[in-house]
Amino acid sequence: MDPTPSPAPTFYPCYRHPDRLTGVRCQRCGRPVCGECATPASVGVHCPECVALSNQATRRPKPLSRWKGSAVTLSLGAINVAVWAALWLTGAGNSPAFTFLAMHPKAHCMVGNDLYLGIGQAACVASGGTFSPGVAEGAVWQLLTSGFTHVSPVHIFVNMLSLWVLGPQLEVALGRVRFVVLYLVSLLAGSVAVYWLAGTATTTLGASGAIFGLLGGLSLLAWKIGGDVRNVLFWLGLNIVFTFLGGPLISWQGHLGGLAGGLAVTALFLAGRRNPRLAWGGVAGLVVLLVALTALRTLMLA
């Protein structure tokens, strides 16, 4: 008895080349494909459209360029460098802009090498001195501008190098807006700590408070996501040791205040990942607290 003959194959025009007949279909979508259009797969063949969709689904995202992911970091660095250059060209520590931008808890008058507190601007100038307004007398802008003020080339180089090392990581992880908030609130927290804990005759400047805030934020973020925090904690610990052993010109108040501010802001952002309103409300509350502490200290120094 003869075996049952197989049915004759059915041919269809290729969906891309209608003048070509084919008996092969795409394993995924079923479209008929000719030999030119067919791509061999683990099972059957795939058409060009299905191959493109597969490649798109499995394509790995390109790594974010350090430069493209660092717009805010570069902007903050540019502002710091621009202020430093302007001061350097106009007399550095003797520049009129220096007394306006650097932070002085109370107004003071420098007559030669002698420092006088509680002297008004008119009396100071009449005595041939240099008058420097203070936060207690209303120069509250110094709480922020002091963090963008540098005189020494070494000082700004170290701070800007630290900003470049820390900033891009946090800018990508937190987003640009949150990163700016972290930087500025850390700076403000450092200045408020100086206002409360440093002597009223001190002059404070530099981005170190904000840098310590970034160090605190990065260490907390690395710990939260289960990363290796040993390297960050090593540099944080080294900077804290240097803060207390580096000499009287280093503001431990600004460093630790900035660190506390950075930890607080980052903790609020992490706690409010599912509820952004909670996070931003907490940050707003922290800023209000810092403003209230500034007002209270001003009343105490009046």
Image (cartoon, grey):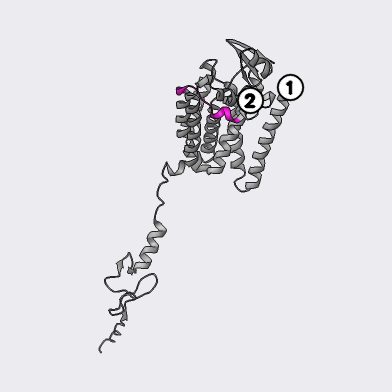
* Of residues 152 and 236, the one drawn nearer to the viewer in this rendering: 152
Is residue 210 something that shows in the picture? yes
Residue 240: x percent and y percent?
Answer: 53, 23
The residue labelled by disc 1 is 300
Name which residue type carries label 1: Met
Q: Position of residue 138 (x, y in %)?
A: 68, 27
Mark 1 vs mark 2, CA separation in Å: 15 Å
Where residue 109 sits, quadrant-wise, is top right
Which disc is residue 193 wearing?
2
Residue 230 visible in the displayed image:
no
Image position of 105 (left or right of 248): right
- Residue extending farthest to the left is 2
Q: Which mark is drawn over residue 249?
A: none
Q: Residue at x 49, y 36 (%)?
A: 167
x%, y% of residue 163?
A: 48, 32
Instruction: Provide residue 172's location: percent of width, then percent of height.
Output: 49, 43
The correct choice, above or below, for 121 with respect to 9 in the image is above
Work out whether mark 1 precedes mark 2 in sequence or the reverse, and give the earlier one: 2
- Report the side of 245 relative to 18 (left or right): right
Q: Quadrant of residue 268?
A: top right
Query: Of helix, strand and loop, which one carries label 1?
Result: helix
The total of numbered circles placed on residues is: 2
Q: Amino acid at mark 2?
A: Ala
- Given residues 32 and 252, the one toward you in this image is 252
Left or right side of 161 for 223 = right
Question: Is residue 124 placed above or below 11 in the rendered structure?
Answer: above
Q: Residues within 10 Å of mark 1 (few under 14, many from 20)?
A: few
Relative vertical location of residue 266 with respect to residue 125 in this rendering, above or below: below
Quarter in which the C terminus is drawn: top right
Farthest residue toward the front?
126
Magenta region, residue range: 144-154
Q: Dominant secondary structure of the magenta stretch?
A: helix
